[in-house]
Image (spheres, rainbow, N blue to C red):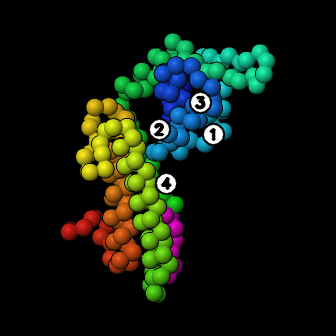
Amino acid sequence: MPSLSASAYVVLGLLESGPATPYALDREIQRSVGHFWDFPRSQIYAEAARLVRRGLVTEEREAAGRRRRTLALTRAGRDTLAAWLTGPAEAATDVRDEGLLRLYFQQDAASDGEGVRRLAQAQVAAHRAKLAEYEAILVWAGAGDSAGVGPRFETPQAAALAFGMRFEELAVEFWTEVAEGGAGVVDPRGRGR
């Protein structure tokens, strides 16, 4: 069987908890993996249809009313998910950051650098906001508190949250450095080298 996309594995992974409608999957994505995996709502329907055709997911539709679709894993779907979870992760992180893309194409760095500073300040604010969102999730989940107690690594989900928080901290540090000194002062190998 040809390999599946990572988005297909998101659907399989979420259905492992039990049957769900595409709407319920979307809500779960938005409050969980959607923080680190971009997953447009329309893709849920497309992935679900592909997984049904492959026999990895079943679909039942209400006979009347809203005719909602309920998706459930098949045994083959569970086996496929298990094989993926225990197999090697061969792909490196794919960084798709609009702020970095805009930074790359800035033309005013050689002049006064005001465009770079404005961009960097906006990115600092955006990454601080995302970090605050992660910290709120941490408090809500009971894995830490606002006094600085970090996440307990009792679950893989807490470890994923820790990665997100560390990433946002790094982004705030990077963009602060750009805002304060301009893009030309950032050492590509990191601070202190």
Q: Is residue 37 left or right of residue 181?
A: right
- Does residue 169 show up? yes
Q: Which residue is mark 2?
A: 32
Q: Nearer the viewer, residue 145 or 67?
A: 145
Residue 181 place in picture, x, y as percent? 34, 78
* Between marks 2 and 1 in the image, the one whose residue lies nearer the viewer: 2
* Between marks 3 and 1 in the image, the one whose residue lies nearer the viewer: 3
SS assignment at label 2: loop
Query: Can residue 51 be found in the magenta stretch?
Result: no
Q: Which residue is mark 4?
A: 96
Q: Nearer the viewer, residue 80 or 115?
A: 115
Q: Find the distance from the CA under tag 4 to the CA under tag 3.
A: 27 Å
Kindly identify the amino acid type of the residue bearing the numbered disc 3.
Ala
What's drawn in magenta, residue-wise?
99-108
Q: Residue at (30%, 45%) from the top-left corner? A: 145
Q: Quadrant of residue 72?
A: top right
Mark 2 or mark 1, which has the lower sequence index? 2
Binning the other alpha carbons within 10 Å of mark 3 as few (below 14), some (14 to 19) or many (20 upward) gives few
Q: Residue at (55%, 14%) from the top-left corner? A: 74
Q: Residue at (45%, 82%) from the top-left corner? A: 113
- Does residue 100 show up? no
Binning the other alpha carbons within 10 Å of mark 1 as few (below 14), some (14 to 19) or many (20 upward) gives some
Q: Which residue is mark 1?
A: 41
Mark 2 or mark 3, which has the lower sequence index? 3
Binning the other alpha carbons within 10 Å of mark 4 as few (below 14), some (14 to 19) or many (20 upward) gives few
Kindly identify the amino acid type of the residue bearing the numbered disc 4.
Arg
Which label number is shown at residue 26?
A: none
Q: Is residue 165 above or below residue 79?
A: below
Q: Is residue 124 left or right of residue 73?
A: left
